[in-house]
């Protein structure tokens, strides 16, 4: 016979594993971004989850992005008055409350229809800048103070570059993010196994239980699909000749390219491997960051993206020379788990975790963060 206490415990354990428990699950249930991903995984169609979560081929770079953070440790300072902590900074002339920006992510409609607009609304509410091709148009028309960076450049010839730069400037963009690491659609094994059809990015995936039709654009064939293989440094000059918008070059890993970006007029770079989704075997973003920062030599600000899931990850990136970070999958896990409130909670959580990590590390403001705050310990 069970005692009353152990009977209660077994009932609680049963409830925790039962569907009843997940019905009571709300946006406050997950306590970190990893748990948002677990809920997103349960709620999303496998095709959609894999599309978002996966990296290219053997996913070495995808894993390396996270593992790089595991090898960097913080050396906290103590006996500093940290009762006030300021996470704000100025980037490209605009003051931001947090050094966190929402990265461009295509295919959000795999999660919910009009997802770009939902994520943009969440970013606005949390005062975070967002990079999106289309999501902010409605907010701008309504006169909302959204900070919007755009990202869909089209054909990389002079005339298109000029027309594009003028158009997005008129539409209210505050910067152009020029993605330079996807000349071709990459090879993603998970998508290939799933017979993922890139047309789903517009139409959404089949409903749970519905059969998966044969792909209209088979993922393996899409691997050979050129995006913009003729994109060169000239693009920056063309766009800058036609508009005043700053250009953030996203997808730099090699310090030689970091230096060339400066020479060719980039206003900022993001050290990035596209979240491990393009060239598998490419170096982790965090590992590439310090050399790229050195190559730029303080002439333009450097962002980084890839693997950010915690506030302490952001602190490590800032210590290694980033002025801010872009986050790709984290807001998508919030979106898939709980819609707009989920995105807002993820954005809030990362900001709050950063602030706490700064306080625990004895840092009062971003300008106090430098390489002396971290030590790389090889695995
Ligand atoms: C589903 C998905 C779609 C993406 N689409 C784009 C894109 O269209 N353009 C781009 O520059 N980067 C794209 N990225 C890469 C992100 O901008 C960013 O570099 C990457 O997600 C950062 O890694 P993280 O997801 O670990 O934060 C995409 C990433 C994901 C997860």
Image (cartoon, rainbow, N blue to C red):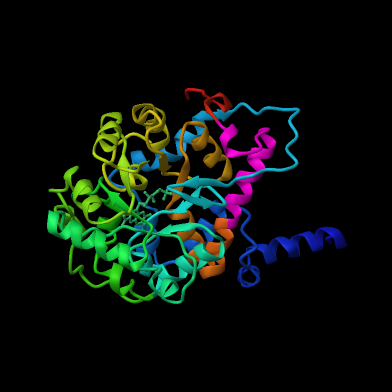
Residue 224: percent from left, percent from top: 14, 52
Instruction: Decide: is 265 above or below 129.
Output: above
- Main SS of the magenta part reads helix
At 46% across and 40% down in the image, what residue appears? 66
Residue 181: percent from left, percent from top: 25, 45
Q: Nearer the viewer, residue 195 or 264?
A: 264
- Give the quadrant of residue 348: bottom right
How many labels sit on residues?
A: 0
Residue 92: percent from left, percent from top: 42, 47
Looking at this view, name the residue that lies furthest to the right.
4
At 48% across and 54% down in the image, what residue appears? 330
Give the extent of the magenta segment: 348-369
Residue 158: percent from left, percent from top: 13, 54
Q: Is residue 353 magenta?
A: yes
Instruction: Decide: is 86 above or below 49.
Output: above
Which image quarter is the N terminus in?
Answer: bottom right
- Give the quadrant of residue 117: bottom left
Q: Inspect this view and state whether residue 195 appears.
A: no
At 27% across and 56% down in the image, what residue appears? 243
- Give the quadrant of residue 105: bottom left
Left or right? Give the position of 344 relative to 258: right
Q: Is residue 150 magenta?
A: no
Q: Inspect this view and state whether residue 178 appears.
A: yes
Q: Nearer the viewer, residue 170 or 260?
A: 170
């Amino acid at each position: 016979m069970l005692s009353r206490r152990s009977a209660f415990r077994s009932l609680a354990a049963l409830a925790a594993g039962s569907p009843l428990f997940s019905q009571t699950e709300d946006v406050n249930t997950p306590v970190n971004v990893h748990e948002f991903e677990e809920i997103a995984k349960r709620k999303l169609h496998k095709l959609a989850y894999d599309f978002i979560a996966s990296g290219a081929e053997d996913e070495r770079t995808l894993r390396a992005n996270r593992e790089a953070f595991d090898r960097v440790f913080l050396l906290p300072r103590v006996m500093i008055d940290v009762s006030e902590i300021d996470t704000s900074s100025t980037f490209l002339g605009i003051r931001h409350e947090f050094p966190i920006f929402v990265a461009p992510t295509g295919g959000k409609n795999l999660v919910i229809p009009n997802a770009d607009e939902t994520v943009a609304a969440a970013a606005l509410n949390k005062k975070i800048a967002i990079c999106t091709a289309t999501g902010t148009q409605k907010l701008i028309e309504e006169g909302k103070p959204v900070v919007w960076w755009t990202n869909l450049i089209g054909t990389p010839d002079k005339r298109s570059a000029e027309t594009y730069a003028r158009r997005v400037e008129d539409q209210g963009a505050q910067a152009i993010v020029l993605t330079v690491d996807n000349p071709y659609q990459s090879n993603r094994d998970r998508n290939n196994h799933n017979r993922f059809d890139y047309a789903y990015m517009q139409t959404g995936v089949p409903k749970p239980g519905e059969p998966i039709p044969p792909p209209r654009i088979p993922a393996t064939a899409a691997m050979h699909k050129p995006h913009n293989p003729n994109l060169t440094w000239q693009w920056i000059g063309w766009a800058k000749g036609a508009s005043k918008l700053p250009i953030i070059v996203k997808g730099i890993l090699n310090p030689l390219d970091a230096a060339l970006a400066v020479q060719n007029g980039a206003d900022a770079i993001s050290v990035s491997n596209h979240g491990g989704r393009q060239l598998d075997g490419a170096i982790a973003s965090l590992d590439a960051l310090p050399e790229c920062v050195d190559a730029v030599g303080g002439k333009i600000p450097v962002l980084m993206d890839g693997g950010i899931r915690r506030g302490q990850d952001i602190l490590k990136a800032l210590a290694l020379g980033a002025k801010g970070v872009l986050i790709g999958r984290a807001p998508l896990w919030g979106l898939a788990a709980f819609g707009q409130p989920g995105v807002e909670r993820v954005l809030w959580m990362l900001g709050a975790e950063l602030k706490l990590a700064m306080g625990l590390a004895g840092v009062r403001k971003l300008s106090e963060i430098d390489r002396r705050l971290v030590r790389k310990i090889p695995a």
